[in-house]
Image: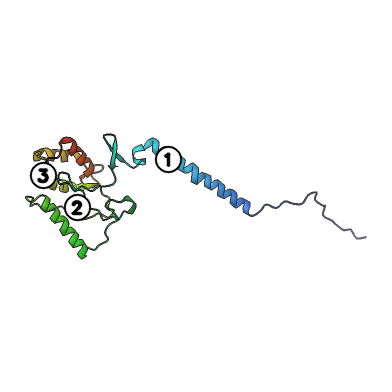
Amino acid sequence: MTTTLSTPATSAATTEVPLWRPALTLFVVLSLVTGLAYPLVVTGVAQSVFPNEANGSLIVHEGKTVGSALIGQTFADPGHFWSRPSATGPMPYNAGNSGGSNLSPTAPALVDAVKARVEALRAADPGNTKPVPVDLVTTSASGLDPHISRAAADYQVARVARVRGLPVEKVKALVELQTEGRWLGFVGEPRVHVLKLNLALDALAAPAAVR
């Protein structure tokens, strides 16, 4: 007699999990973690610990936002200190289009631009025969530099003092006060934030007529 083994019948059919369900679940979880929770945590910490930096390092003067500590501005008035030139487009110091001119040192366009800047500096201060600091006539790689070198600030002291009718020593003292030292005492070079210097200058005395 032959015995036949049979598999017991199941009471219900096995339910299969759709292949798309784990992928969708993972997508939703990661979206909540990386797209919502993480940005909220980072933003909250930044606003609590570094509120000034998190909001753009803005400079507020007399209740008005006048610029950022990270982005330069154009000053063409001879009674103000001038910034380092910017090659960003379509306007100077455009933070949305940071970059340099990408011109080689021998490019005619760069040579002509430097000559024009030197001539503008000489025309604004004819009696100044000192060598023109390089950062006053060349652009930086970012085009956003808010600082100039101490040499560039010192070069402009006589012009600013003459235009404003101030003693040269008083303007020199203001530059000294606004000079930022090396980071940690040895990294980088002393520099001057142009916007902050000009704000201090405006607070010192109103511009006089150009003589």
Inter-mark Cα distance, 3 to 2: 25 Å
The kind of residue on which mark 2 rests is Asp
Q: Residue furthest front?
A: 209
Label 3 CA crowd tier, 10 Å (few <14, some 14–19, many 20+): few
Q: Residue at x 39, y 37 (%)?
A: 47
In the picture, measured across the screen, residue 166 lies left or right of residue 183, that is left
Nearer the camera: disc 3 or disc 2: 3
Viewer-nearest of discs 1 and 3: 3
Residue 38, position as x, y percentages in the image:
47, 43
Q: Is residue 105 visible?
A: no
Residue identified by numbered label 3? 210
Residue type, mark 1 in image: Thr
Residue at far right of view: 1
The residue beneath circle 2 is 135
**Which residue shows up at 56% across the image and 47% down it?**
28
Q: Which residue is nearer to you in this view: 189 or 24?
A: 24
The first of marks 1 and 2 along the sequence is 1
Residue bearing the label numbered 1: 43
Query: Are the two marked residues, 1 and 3, in contact with CB atoms closer than 8 angstroms?
Result: no
Place of residue 62 in the rendered image (x, y in percent of width and height, measured from the top left): 26, 34
C-alpha separation, residue under disc 1 versus residue under disc 2: 36 Å
